[in-house]
Image (spheres, rainbow, N blue to C red):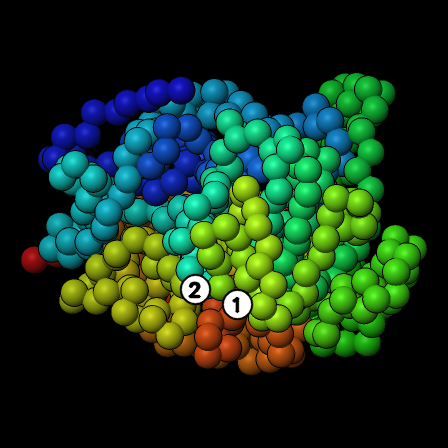
Amino acid sequence: MSGHLDSTSDHIHQVAIVGAGFAGIGTAIRLQQARVDDIVVLERSDRPGGTWRDNTYPGAACDIPSRLYSYSFAPNPSWSRTYSGSAEILAYIESMVDQHDLDRVIRYGTTVTDLTFDEPAGLWRVSVDGGETVLARTAVIASGPLSTPGFPDIPGIEEFAGKRMHSAAWDHDYDFAGKKVGVIGTGASAVQIIPELVEQAAAVTVFQRTPGWVLPRFNPEVGETTKALYRTIPGLQSLARAAWFAGHESVAVGVVWKSPATRVVEAVSKLNMRLQVRDPWMRRQLTPDFRAGCKRLLMTSRYYPALQADNCRLITWPIARICEEGVRTAEGIEHRFDCLVFATGFEVSKQGAPIPITGRDGRVLGDEWSRGAYAYKSFAVSGYPNLYITFGPNSGPGHSSALVYMEAQIDAIVTAVRTIIDRDLAVLDVEPGAQHRYNETIQRRLQRTTWNSGCSSWYLTEDGFNATMYPGFASQYVAQMRTVDLTRDFTAVARREVP
Ligand code: N01
C-alpha cells in the first residue's frame, strides 16, 4: 500500500495525525465525517495497523471479543471467531483505510521526530525525518503507548549468539522446527506465543519471573447463520456489542476495585488451574502472590496445557545472566538455546512523550512528565494548545475494549478540532486548574484500585505513580469524555486577536 500527499513547507493542514493504527485511522475517519478535510496522517511504517501490524507472533489474537473490537460505526459481520486473530484485525483496519479512501491522506514511511508549537502563528511545526517540516493547526498524537519493543535489562543480553526475537518484531522466516527455544516473560503476549512454539519447536523452556492470574478463554467460530443474521438485520450486531459491553462492565467490579469481588475472580482462576494443571508443585509455581487484576488478567485455555507438554519446561529460578549459548539462572545452571524469544513487553517509560514535544514558552512535555504523565481527561495537556493525544495518561482500560475508550477520545478530539476551525482559534489551551483538579480526583480514586495494590507492572512508574489506567468503568470514561468543557476548562485566543 502506498500513499502520498504533497506537503510543501508553507501549506498548513487543519490536522496532522501521528500514527496510522486503530486510533489514527479512527480519528481520520471521524474528522472526515465532521467535514474536516485537510488532514495528513504521518506513519513511520509502510502499512497501517499499528499494534496489529507489528504483533504478528504465532497465536497473536485479541483477548477482547471481536464485536467489541471494531469501530462502533463500522461493525464487521464477518469476524470468524469470538476472539479474532491479529491477521483478521489487521485486515479490518486495512478495509477501513480502503473504504474511507485514506491512502489519499496517509504518508507512509514518514517518521515524526518532534513537534513544536509556534504560538505567534497558532500552529504546530511537525518535523519528520529527512528534514521536512509539516505544518498543522492541530496535532493529534496517535502513536500508541505500546509501540516500541522492550528488552529486559539482563546482563549479557548482547552476548547471545543464537537468534533473538521480540514478540512485537517476529521473524516469520525463522524455522522453529527442531530448535531449542527459551522464552523470557509470561505476560499476555507470552501466554499466546508459548502454546504455538510448543507445537513448532523441539523444546521450549519458559522463564517465569511472576506468574499471572489466568482465566479460561473459549474461542468458538462464529457460525455462518450468525454472520448472515448480522448482515441482514440492521442493528443486531450493535445489540450483541452492547451485550458484550455490559458483560465486561460487570467483570470490572472484580478487576478494578480492591473489593471482595476480586476474590471471585481469583477463585475462578484457581479452579481453572486445578482443572488444567495436574501437578501440585507446578500449581504452586503458577499461583500468583498478588491480587487478581493488579497485573493484566491472562485470558487463555491453551497456556497451562502447553506448559505441561513433554517438550516444555517451566523455570522459576531468577535469570542471572544471558551468555553466548543461552541463559544462566541464579542456581548456576546454564540452559542452551538456538533461539531466545523476548515476550518482555514494551518501552513504556517513553509512554508519556513518545516524541519530543515543545509547547508554549519552550515547555518540553517529556521533562514535565518525567516523573509520571498527566493530562486533562487524558487527551489534552495544559501548555500544549491544539494538541490531543489518544491513549494518553490514565486512559488505559483494565477490563474492557480499548476501542470503547478510544472512540470516546476521538469524539472529544473532533469536537475540539471543529471548535478551533469554526471559531478560527489560534490557541485552545487547557486551564491548569481544571487539569489539576481532574488529576487529583484520578490519583485519589486510583488508590482504591487493584492496580495500586502492591504488584509491579508496566502500569506503574518506578516510584509507583499510575499514569496509565483509568480508575473506573468504561461507561464512566465515556461519560467523562462527553463532559469535556471547551468553554469552562479551556482558554481560547482567536486568530484575529493574535498581535
Ligand atoms: O508484556 P508485559 P506483554 N526477567 O509487560 C517479564 C497488551 N497485550 O507484551 O511480570 C524476567 O505484560 C515480565 O515479568 P514480571 C496488554 O495491554 C494485549 O505480555 O515483570 N522476566 C512479564 O512476565 C498487555 O498488558 C493483548 O515479573 C522479565 C513479561 O516479561 C501489554 O500488551 C495481547 C524481565 C512482560 O509482560 C503488554 O503485554 C498481548 C526480566 N528482566 C498483549 N523483564 C490482547 O490480546 C520483563 N519480564 C489485546
Q: Is residue 20 above or below residue 482?
A: above
Relative to 10, 32 lies left or right:
right
Whichever of callouts 1 and 2 sits on the residue coming sooner in the sequence is 2
Residue 314 at what x, y percent from top left? 71, 57
Q: Quadrant of residue 376?
A: bottom left
Query: How far across and how far down the image is residue 475, in percent?
Result: 66, 57
Residue 176's quadrant in the figure?
A: top right
Query: Residue at the spot x=26%, y=25% of the render?
Result: 5
Q: Secondary structure at mark 2?
A: loop
Q: Is residue 284 left or right of residue 11?
A: right
Tell me if label 1 and label 2 are in contact, CB under 8 Å.
yes
Q: Amino acid at mark 1?
A: Ala
Say which residue label 1 marks. 320
Quadrant placement of the C terminus: bottom left
Q: Is residue 98 visible?
A: yes
Q: Residue at x 34, y 71 (%)?
A: 370
| Marks 1/2: CA–CA distance | 8 Å
Relative to 213, residue 312 above or below: above
Inspect this view and state whether residue 474 appears: no
